Image (cartoon, rainbow, N blue to C red):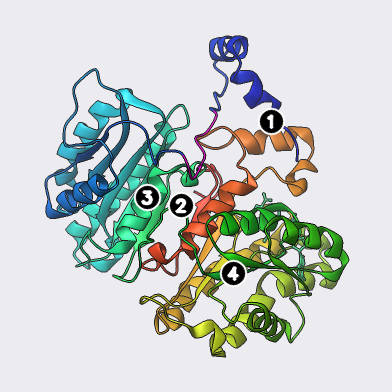
């Protein structure tokens, strides 16, 4: 993994002085999740007068946070939750937006702004949808204005759903915590009352069994570690050629290794057999294995195109059919069924020169999860995707220095993400507290300028 020496330099005393005076980007050291650390340190202000705002404030109080409805002009603020659910027209946004704006200079480093509004798509009334889309656009732009590692994201509440739904608590907690360190300008939609809050927020995946493909290295190995830290038992899958690294990664998380090429016709059966034999259950599937074979389309050949499609999407579609037809992957516990999380990419959103094959496969993943949610809902389960932007991995370390530097800085946090940032979001979407969210692609990209 390449070191981001610029970020290190900026965060030294002299470095900050020099780069500030030159007007250069100021990447901050991000607040990342540690189970033993407080959820967030300092006052959390809830802006807005509605039942949803009251319910959110009540929920935050149960987490022993310093919850306020107003704040003095000199006090520091850790987070602002601005609730817009009653905005019926765009003009209604003004009051809460300006109140939120008035607090931004008091926001602590790595602070959080979370907006909450009703799902624009769930109304056909042009004025109401305009108001909701207005809240969305405001949040996105505000995210570009945040400083010192602070972020702005939104929670999109489905019509009729009230804020006591477990999914709202799960999303609030994820967005307030360091789990979402590299997530900004994004929206977590909560579509249903499904979900179960953990007894222990430090072990939200206790007793769950997860399989992670492509887990021998990179983002997959990090996902296995985070799922394990959150309490899950993990099956790590990778190709036989990566056997040694796979065994080491599995040992590290006290998991089991399964050498398997996921493009095999019987890949899902092999996973089900392994899970049955070792654990007797399977709750979470993370489709992480992926490959790139970049070439301009004018120079593309069949092996490059076909292998990317085969590994990155066809294998997942085939495996899901078998997994969802099995009894082992159908268990419903406390109202929560199987969960699938798939790795997409911002390339699949914005496109990327030289990556027609890869972008096709990653857009296809997003199509699969948005259409698959109905199928999973019937089983009380969920299917979601995570789209990483520039992440510091072996893959991105191979990029030419100039391209890498530009890719790193072209986002609202002016730095690359770490594999753990992707892993935290995968773990959140795999958790029972996120069971009200399905069909979503959540970007972990620091609000990358491409793919907005
Ligand atoms: P990586 O190349 O470091 O790791 C991928 C792993 O998948 C490898 O261990 C590889 O052996 C395994 N794999 C490949 N084909 C397989 C197959 N047929 N069967 C089983 N295992 C197989 O990649 P990474 O950077 O850790 O990326 C992980 C995922 O995240 C991929 O889906 C990638 O497309 C996606 N992603 C990564 C980035 C990034 O910046 N690194 C950005 C966006 C998306």
Residue at which label 1 appears: 4
Give ligand 1's quarter of the image. bottom right
State whether residue 294 is above or below residue 8.
below
Q: Nearer the viewer, residue 341 or 63?
A: 63
| Alpha-carbon span between mark 2 and mark 3 | 12 Å
Magenta part of the protein: which range?
Answer: 29-36
Task: For the residues labelled 2 and 1, say whether their Cβ atoms are less than 8 Å apart.
Answer: no
Would you say the beta carbon of the disc 1 residue lies within 8 angstroms of ligand 1? no
Residue 357: where, in percent of width, then height? 71, 65
If you read the primary sequence from the N terminus, does the residue marked by circle 2 or circle 3 appear first? 3
Would you say the beta carbon of the disc 3 residue lies within 8 angstroms of ligand 1? no
Q: In the rendered image, is residue 324 in sight?
A: yes
Residue at which label 4 appears: 210
Q: Secondary structure at mark 4?
A: strand
Residue at which label 3 appears: 173
If you read the primary sequence from the N terminus, does the residue marked by circle 1 or circle 3 appear first? 1
- In the rendered image, residue 319 lying in the magenta stretch gets the answer no
Residue 36: where, in percent of width, then height? 47, 42
**Viewer-nearest of discs 2 and 4:** 2
If you read the primary sequence from the N terminus, does the residue marked by circle 2 or circle 1 appear first? 1
Q: Secondary structure at mark 3?
A: helix
Q: Secondary structure at mark 1?
A: loop
């Amino acid at each position: 993994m390449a070191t981001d020496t610029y970020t290190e330099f900026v965060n030294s005393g002299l470095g900050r002085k020099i780069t500030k005076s030159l007007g250069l980007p100021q990447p901050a050291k991000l607040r990342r999740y540690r189970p033993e650390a407080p959820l967030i340190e300092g006052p959390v202000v809830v802006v807005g007068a509605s039942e949803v705002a009251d319910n959110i404030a009540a929920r935050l109080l149960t987490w022993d946070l310093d919850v306020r409805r107003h704040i003095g002009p000199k006090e520091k603020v850790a987070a602002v939750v601005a609730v817009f659910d009653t905005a019926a027209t765009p003009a209604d946004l003004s009051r809460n937006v300006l109140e939120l704006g008035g607090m931004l200079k008091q926001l602590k480093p790595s602070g959080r702004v979370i907006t909450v509004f009703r799902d624009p798509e769930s109304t056909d009334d042009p004025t109401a949808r305009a108001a909701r889309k207005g809240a969305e656009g405001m949040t996105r732009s505000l995210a570009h204005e945040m400083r010192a590692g602070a972020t702005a994201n939104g929670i999109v509440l489905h019509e009729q759903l009230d804020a006591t739904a477990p999914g709202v608590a799960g999303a609030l907690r994820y967005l307030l915590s360091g789990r979402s360190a590299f997530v900004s300008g994004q929206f977590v939609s909560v579509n249903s009352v499904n979900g179960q809050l953990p007894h222990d927020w430090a072990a939200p995946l206790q007793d769950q069994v997860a399989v992670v493909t492509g887990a021998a290295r990179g983002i997959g190995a990090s996902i296995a570690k985070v799922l394990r830290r959150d309490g899950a038992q993990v099956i790590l899958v990778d190709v036989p050629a990566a056997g040694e690294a796979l065994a080491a990664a599995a040992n590290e998380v006290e998991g089991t290794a399964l050498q398997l090429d996921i493009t095999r016709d019987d890949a899902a059966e092999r996973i089900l057999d392994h899970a049955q034999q070792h654990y007797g259950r399977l709750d979470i599937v993370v489709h992480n294995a992926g490959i790139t074979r970049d070439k301009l389309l004018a120079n593309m050949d069949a092996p490059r195109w076909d292998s990317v499609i085969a590994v990155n999407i066809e294998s997942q579609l085939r495996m899901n059919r078998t997994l969802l037809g099995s009894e082992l992957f159908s268990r419903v516990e406390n109202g929560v069924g199987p969960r699938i999380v798939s790795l997409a990419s911002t390339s699949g959103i914005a496109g990327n020169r030289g990556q027609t094959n890869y972008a096709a496969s990653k857009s296809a993943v997003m199509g699969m999860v948005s259409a698959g949610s109905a199928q999973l809902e019937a089983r009380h389960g969920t299917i979601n995707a995570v789209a990483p932007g520039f992440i510091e991995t072996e893959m991105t370390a191979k990029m030419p220095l100039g391209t890498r530097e530009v890719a790193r800085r072209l986002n609202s946090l002016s730095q690359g993400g770490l594999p753990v940032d992707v892993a935290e979001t995968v773990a959140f979407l795999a958790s029972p507290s996120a069971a009200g969210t399905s069909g979503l692609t959540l970007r972990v990209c620091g609000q990358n300028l491409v793919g907005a």
